[in-house]
Amino acid sequence: MMLAGYAMLLGFWYFTVEVWKLPRFRDMPGLTTVFTEMFNRHPVYGLSIYTPEYYDHIWASVRRVATAFFLATGLGVPLGLFLGWSKSFREYVFPIFETLRPIPILAWVPLAILMFSGTETPVIFLTFLASFFATALNTMLGVESIDESYSRAAYCLGASKWQVFREVIVPGSMPYIFTGLQISVGVAWFSLVAGEMVSGEFGLGYVINTSYTMVQYPTIVIGMVTLGAVGYVTSAMVRVVGDMMMQWRVRELALGGR
């Protein structure tokens, strides 16, 4: 079924651009053109799976997303846990959080360039921002979703406040945390492309922006396809790690489906 879905997408692309030549699609690079360029040992525009530059750009983007994602996880998860757990902490911090969260990533670009030197750190900062807000918000919602009776039962059994946090709050919010991390790694790729278009020297976003400037439309699609493939893999990796850390959740869903 997955292969059928991809076949339908590729078929739609092929027929709308190369066969029917619909008004909104006829100027786009066709499926044949893109695949010929992508798998060409001597590409017309200099970028294919056989050129070292292609993998240099992928590595640059993956490195930036990984750095930003781990920073966002390390800061966003604890912040979200405390936002959901402590009402007083939430009253102080959440209004500031909600004020900053809707600001578009592109609006941060000038400040990022002013605050950080070089071309690498601003891109990582912009990628981190979107990922951080998604992680923290979903973690907070996960804590708020926990039935308060679990905490009360733990206190009645003699658990300390730290034990309740460690044994009830953290495990109970894990499904939301890993849902947030999957969203987080996705939005990290979104913001990465915006950052690389503005201040990057390497990376898939840089490839897309430069190719547009130089009217190399097949290379734009190659960059987009690569982004989709790498993003799919990173999201799947987060999902696998989540399933490994929440075996109880997997068993619960399996039993619920019987």
Image (spheres, rainbow, N blue to C red):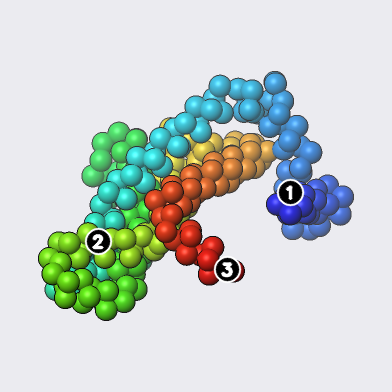
Name the kind of residue labelled 2 in the image.
Glu
Label 1 Cα neighbours within 10 Å, binned few <14 / some 14-19 / many ≥20? few
Q: Earlier in the sequence, mark 1 or mark 3?
A: 1
For residue 64, above or below residue 7: above
Q: Do the residues labelled 1 and 3 touch (CB within 8 Å)?
A: no
Task: Give the quadrant of the N terminus.
Answer: bottom right
For residue 73, above or below residue 223: below
Q: Which mark is residue 257?
A: 3
Secondary element type, mark 1: helix
Please give left or right for residue 142 compared with residue 207 in the image: left
What residue would you read off at disc 1? 3
Please give left or right for residue 25 compared with residue 127 in the image: right
Name the kind of residue labelled 1 in the image.
Leu
> Quadrant of the rendered structure where residue 104 is?
bottom left
Q: Distance between the residues labelled 1 and 3?
A: 26 Å
Q: Earlier in the sequence, mark 3 or mark 2?
A: 2
Q: Distance between the residues labelled 2 and 1?
A: 42 Å
x 25%, y 40%: residue: 116
Label 3 Cα neighbours within 10 Å, binned few <14 / some 14-19 / many ≥20? few
Q: Position of residue 45 (x, y in %)?
A: 65, 28
Secondary element type, mark 2: helix
Q: Do the residues labelled 2 and 1 touch (CB within 8 Å)?
A: no
x 30%, y 33%: residue: 118
x 75%, y 32%: residue: 36
Secondary element type, mark 3: loop
Residue toward you, 258 or 249: 258
For residue 224, above or below residue 53: below
Q: Earlier in the sequence, mark 2 or mark 1?
A: 1
> Quadrant of the rendered structure where residue 106 is?
bottom left
What residue would you read off at disc 2? 167
The total number of labels drawn is 3
